[in-house]
Image (spheres, rainbow, N blue to C red):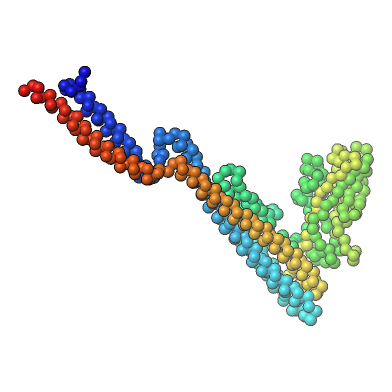
Amino acid sequence: MSSFSQINTNIQAQQAFQNLSDTSEQLAETRERLTTGLRINSASDDAAGFEIAEGLEARTGSQQQALRNIGDAKSALSVAEGGLDSQLNILQSAREKAVQAANGSLSQNERNAIAGELQEQVGEINDIAKNTTFNGDKLIEGGTSGDSGNSVGLTFQTGSESDQTFDVNIENSTAEDLGVQSNLDVTTTDGQDVSAGDFTRSQAVTAASGNISPSASGTNLAGTLEGGTFDVTVERSGTSLTLKANGSTVSAAGTNGGGNGTFTGSTSVTLSSDTSGNKIALNVTELSVRKGDITDGGSKDFSVQVRDSENIGSRLQGGSSDEAREIINDVDSAINSLTSHLSDLGASQNRLSFKESNLETSQTNLQAAQSRIQDADFAKEQTQAAKLQVQQQSGTAQLAQANAAGQSVLSLLQ
């Protein structure tokens, strides 16, 4: 039945209103896309696309932060490089002074004056090591927290994933680490407990009161003796124990069938010697090895450190041209160590640059992928908006006409 003569329910007006509402809703969505520039503005627009796009957004944002991290890392390494460069300049100057002091035409007063200058240069090397910091962390002395150690370990977050890190170890660069100043001492690696090498505290193997016995004057090692780290070996053969170091062998006293043995204070093993008969000897007051610590025919090791106390300036004070020549060798060794540190640092900086370039490329590609999923096509959306605006205007006009259609029934009631 035709709805032309029905007044209570205007079907034509309802249909026109529904179509106009749909058109207005589509136009609103199109205008939202044109104003935000995004095709997907909520999960309801494209559930799967929304999930993928948001995941990509999280990664690209993290990669942007990783790029900033790399910039900070390069800044930190540049600060460390600046400190090492300054130390290198000082060492080069110190070498020139040592070469000058080695000349036999100088008087002792002149050589002592050079010695005073070398002492100040060693002090400045230590000051640079102490004050080369980034965000409060020391870079070339004692680790990032100021603790003692052989190197400064830095871990940089250079990617958006938890495992994308880059480790940089910067060797400590104090005067002592470079070999131009140190302390006369002999210790096991961990105080008086032998915890280096194959021994552990739980085995109750101790090297108590290790004493240095060089034929030396003052606090310097005699002759051409040089300090360093020396390995000491304890061997067992049946019930016999021997202590060995640098070709020197000492048998243990008090061994028994159980394999226990004790090296007493009369035990002295030579760690190093020179052609003049000067030697560094380790006198052990008690080094005990318990049953089962070493298997028959086996051996275990520990380390002993010996260091000369004076810096190059103190050594030259009152010294001869021969001492100056020894200092030249020490400074050469320090320069070689420092240039090696700088080379390693430069290689790390280059790797950071490569990571930065790769991260920028990855970020660009991920942003392109996100754009293809999420961004709006402005030409398409603008064309759609123009069409929907015409439909909206036409729908409004048709709704008005549908609302007025019922008035034509009044002519039948006249």
Q: Residue furthest front?
A: 2
Q: Position of residue 400 (x, y in %)?
A: 19, 33
89 relative to 236, above or below? below
Q: Residue at x 66, y 66 (%)?
A: 87
Which residue occupies the foreground of this view, 105 or 291?
A: 105
In the picture, which quadrant includes the C terminus? top left
212 relative to 291, above or below? below
Q: Quadrant of residue 338?
A: bottom right
Answer whether residue 199 is visible to the viewer in this image.
yes
Answer whether residue 136 is visible to the viewer in this image.
no
Q: Residue at x 64, y 50 (%)?
A: 167
Q: Quadrant of residue 307?
A: bottom right
Q: How many marks?
A: 0
Tell whether 267 sits left or right of 203.
Answer: right
Which residue occupies the foreground of this view, 252 or 33?
A: 33
Q: Quadrant of residue 3?
A: top left
Q: Position of residue 68 (x, y in %)?
A: 53, 52
Q: Residue furthest top?
A: 1
Q: Position of residue 291 (x, y in %)?
A: 87, 38
Q: Residue at x 51, y 49 (%)?
A: 364
Q: Position of residue 113 (x, y in %)?
A: 72, 76
Q: Residue at x 12, y 26 (%)?
A: 408
Q: Residue furthest left?
A: 414
In the picture, which quadrant includes the N terminus? top left
Tell whether 25 sits left or right of 90.
Answer: left
Which residue occupies the foreground of this view, 369 or 330?
A: 369
